[in-house]
């Protein structure tokens, strides 16, 4: 679980301040700027290219054998000794399984992110910001409704041209959100005279809040660098957290960290499919498991691409050639499967939606219905998921057509490979070792055999491309010496949310030992 993917509620307002305060900067201007850079986006990550968008020059991406070598070559922030950084380093080192998980999750995205970092000439350390924001989970959503790898809230996402509707959310789109985030960060650095620490702090807390903190120090004759500002606990830890993870990845031997070897090569290729297509069909054509397909294409909310676009998919680079060949051979009428339903007596949209495993909203939108009333004898056009046709819907794509699903268990069969251990399998699937033993009726002394098949179960909302992880409420008994800051760190939440859940006033810092606090944590994940 990310140490903190939630944002201060005040961030909503602070991000909107530039709209009101900065002359000449309108939503249109931001969207046009992003759109202009997006025109050449294909060259950034398609196979065999890697062209920069800075003066048309070519970044020397291929000179590094691994993605980590390339990342470290782009580091540009000053090395700083600070107790706040040391605290964050110690936290990461005490949680090696977390470092392993974020590496695995980052693999599909880092090459493209580094291309954007190079193209915009910003510090390489910023490529690791999704570790802090979302733990590199593109479907992560905070209680404050921030979403995606870079955790955009809705208004800021719209300000930077990220389309959001019932079909598609650009905040979760790997390409669009990365381009928007790097553009946003570069603009923030320019606002603060290329002081990247202040830029990062304002990405977290809002530009207005950082400017206010600077003004207060100026009035008091105090220094105005990041480390001297009086900031909230979350923002005070935010920048050190990024500097800490960058420091660890730059010195793996010193910190006894095993960096997983990811080649410095494109992981995916963007393919323009031209028109709406069933995502289950696309995943099969790409010879890619549906869950992995959605990790590359997490922006889609339903079973197909948005009818109004974008009509482009990220395909694993080694599958892209055959995917394009199959796409060229696919008849247009087979891209989406439809059924015609004649409304019978006593039927309504609710019963029709249930019968066809879809939602009322989808039927209304496709058939241009203004309300729930539908006349007997009317013929409705009903979309049918390709996966549903193959009777593979329960744990995969068909659930996207339904309203938010109830918690259920998804099973996956995994074949033991050479070198596998119970620990690394548990880390790979973000489950507990004891659960694996229980699911497969194994004892702790049982040796894993290569080729043996085991069952992996995951409990929670199975909706593919879900925007929000499931949260559960726990009760925590305050111990002597506990502070809100310590408790928030223990459960990877922020102090603002902790106060809100328990109605603790902002001017009250002490909490009584023995009292019980409500804490919302992500289901299926430990506090680390």
Image (cartoon, grey):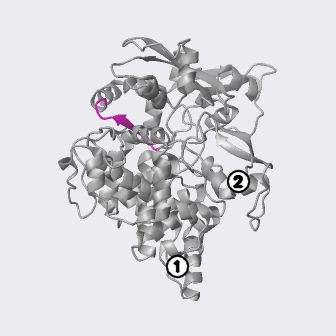
Q: Is residue 83 visible?
A: yes
Q: Position of residue 416 (x, y in %)?
A: 40, 17
Residue 494 falls within the magenta-colored stretch: no
Q: Quadrant of the C terminus?
A: top right
Which percent across, then down, holds residue 117? 34, 57
Q: CA distance from mark 1 to mark 2?
A: 37 Å
Classify residue 242 as left or right of residue 365: left
Residue 298 x %, y %: 49, 39
Between 417 and 212, the one lying in front of the other is 417
From the viewer's side, name the closer residue of 260 and 314.
260
> Pointer 2: what residue?
498
Q: Residue at x 53, y 20 (%)?
A: 436
Asked whether 170 or 333 is in front, the reply is 170
What residue did someone put label 1 on? 23
Earlier along the polypeptide chain: callout 1 or callout 2?
1
User: Helix or strand or loop: what does disc 1 sit on?
Assistant: loop
**Residue extending furthest left?**
63
For marks 1 and 2, give the one nearer the viewer. 2
Q: Which residues are magenta?
A: 310-319
């Amino acid at each position: 679980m990310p140490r903190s993917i939630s944002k201060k509620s005040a961030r909503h307002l602070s991000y909107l301040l530039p709209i009101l305060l900065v002359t000449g900067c309108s939503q249109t201007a931001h969207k046009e700027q992003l759109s202009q850079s997006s025109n050449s986006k294909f060259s950034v990550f398609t196979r065999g290219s890697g062209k920069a968008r800075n003066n048309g020059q070519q970044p020397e991406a291929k000179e590094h054998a691994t993605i980590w070598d390339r990342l470290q070559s782009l580091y540009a922030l000053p090395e700083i000794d600070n107790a706040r950084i040391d605290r964050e380093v110690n936290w990461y080192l005490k949680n090696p399984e977390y470092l392993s998980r974020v590496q695995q999750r980052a693999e599909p995205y880092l090459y493209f992110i580094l291309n954007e970092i190079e193209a915009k000439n910003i510090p390489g350390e910023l490529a690791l910001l999704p570790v802090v924001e979302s733990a590199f989970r593109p479907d992560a959503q905070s209680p404050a409704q921030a979403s995606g790898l870079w955790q955009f809230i809705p208004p800021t996402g719209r300000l930077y041209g990220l389309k959001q509707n019932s079909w598609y959310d650009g905040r979760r789109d790997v390409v669009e959100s990365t381009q928007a985030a790097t553009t946003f960060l570069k603009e923030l650095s320019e606002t603060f005279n290329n002081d990247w620490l202040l830029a990062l702090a304002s990405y977290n807390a809002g530009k207005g809040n950082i400017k206010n903190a600077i003004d207060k120090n100026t009035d008091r004759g105090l220094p105005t660098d990041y480390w001297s500002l009086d900031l909230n606990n979350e923002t005070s830890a935010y920048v050190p957290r990024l500097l800490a993870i960058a420091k660890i990845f730059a010195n793996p031997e010193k910190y006894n960290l095993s960096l997983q070897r990811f080649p410095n090569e494109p992981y995916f290729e963007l393919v323009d499919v031209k028109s709406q297509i069933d995502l289950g069909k696309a995943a099969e054509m790409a010879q890619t498991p549906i869950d992995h397909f959605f990790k590359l294409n997490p922006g889609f909310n339903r079973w197909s691409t948005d009818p109004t676009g974008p009509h482009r998919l990220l395909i694993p680079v080694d599958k892209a050639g055959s995917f394009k060949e199959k796409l060229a051979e696919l008849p247009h009428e087979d891209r989406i499967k439809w059924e015609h339903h004649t409304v019978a007596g006593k039927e309504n949209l609710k019963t029709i939606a249930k019968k066809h495993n879809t939602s009322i909203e989808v039927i209304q939108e496709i058939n241009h219905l203004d309300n729930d009333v539908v006349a007997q004898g009317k013929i409705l056009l009903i979309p049918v998921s390709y996966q549903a046709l193959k009777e593979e819907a329960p744990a995969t794509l068909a659930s996207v057509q339904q309203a938010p699903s109830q918690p259920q268990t998804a099973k996956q069969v995994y074949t033991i490979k050479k070198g596998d251990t119970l620990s690394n399998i548990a880390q790979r699937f973000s489950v507990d070792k004891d659960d694996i033993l229980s699911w497969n009726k194994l004892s702790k002394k049982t040796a894993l055999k290569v080729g043996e098949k085991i069952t992996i179960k995951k409990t929670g909302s199975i909706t593919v491309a879900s925007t929000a992880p499931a949260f559960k409420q726990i009760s925590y008994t305050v111990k002597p010496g506990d502070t809100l800051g310590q408790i928030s760190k223990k459960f990877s939440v922020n102090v603002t949310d902790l106060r809100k859940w328990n109605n603790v006033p902002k001017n009250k810092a002490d909490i009584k030992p023995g009292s019980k606090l409500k804490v919302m944590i992500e289901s299926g994940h430990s506090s680390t």
